Amino acid sequence: MSTQAGRLGHLGILQFAGADAVQFLQGQISNDSRRLAAGKPLLAAYSSPQGRVLAVLHLVPHATGVLAILPRELLLPIQERLRKFVLRAKVSITDQSEALVVVGQTGDQGIRGAGLALPDPALGYAETEGIGVARVGPDAARYWVLGAGERLAALGLLGDDPASIENAWRLADIRAGIPQIYTATSEHFVAQMLNLDLIDGISFTKGCFTGQEIIARTQHLGRIKRRLIRLQLPPGDWQIGQSLRLPDGRSGRLTELASSGAGCEALAVVTLEVADADTEAPANAVAATQLALPYSLSTRA
């Protein structure tokens, strides 16, 4: 696998610090925050009480507190919303995006060359003098690298083409079927519509959390009528949040985009029901092709 590293400027960091940080998150996110206490990174949704995903969080058990990676455009609204639930809990929620940089690293040569520890496969996270390295998913050699910008620059990890690095990272997420939520798609989907139940983003045994009732009901009653799929789109002015209709009659909404060759690849949440074979394609259908994901889509709950 080729090695590539660079700053992901579209992403920022919220820090959850204090004695009650892990416990506080346990009542807010879809996954089991106790795994963070065991030294493992975590993928989770933060949802509204109505079960609609407000943000997808990549959580890292840093020595200074739990660090949540999410799009910069969502940092302030998510921070303000979460602060309302702190009450007497011993936890602070701060934006660390100026102090800490998010780097995306493909391949492990750059990490080794910088003298940083690679995560143990059983944990998925390692830290070297305040610089955290977290594996993205269990199978891919992709890593988050989090640390002070000047230190990462000195280690040669910031890259020199941010736009290219960001597009390559988004494209890798699309091909891995890892969802992302931005302002345009916040509160549009239940967690299962983003396939978070298929990629270890939801715990159904951890107990109560915000939105849990709706997410659990969706799972157990078999009402997952929309799923995240991968598409090849023709050239065009595509936008995240844009609605589209496929030639087979399914409708959906774009959630992630990245340039790929002459067109682009995308993730979109679409309805599962396909029109009858003898039904003509809708007049407004997009000339899109569905591409494979590295995991199976389950239409059952």
Image (tube, grey):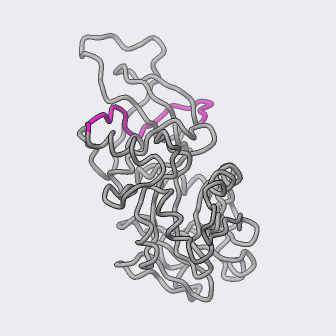
- Residue 84 quadrant: bottom right
Provide residue 116's location: percent of width, then percent of height: 55, 86
- Compared to residue 109, the image places residue 101 above or below, namely above
> In the figure, 83 relative to 111: above or below?
above
Residue sitting at x 34%, y 78%:
122
Q: Is residue 268 shown left or right of residue 162?
A: left
Quadrant of the rendered structure where residue 72 is?
Answer: bottom right
Tell me what residue is drawn at x 68 percent, y 69 percent: 101
Magenta-colored stretch includes residue 225: yes
User: As rendered, which of 71 and 213 lies closer to the eye?
Assistant: 213
Whether residue 272 is situated above or below residue 41 in the rendered picture: above
* Left or right of residue 230, residue 154 in this image: right
Quarter of the C terminus within the rendering: top left
Residue 255 in the image, given as x and y percentages of width and height: 52, 40
Quarter of the image containing the N terminus? Answer: bottom left
Residue 69 versus residue 208: which sits nearer the camera? 208
x then y, percent, for residue 78: 64, 52
Residue 175 falls inside the magenta stretch: no
User: In the drawing, does residue 122 fall left or right of residue 160?
Assistant: left
Side (left or right) of 138 relative to 146: left
Residue 110: image x %, image y %? 55, 78
Which residue is found at the position 36% from the left and 19% from the top?
249
Q: How many numbered badges does the structure rendering display? A: 0
Question: Which residues are the magenta region?
Answer: 221-239
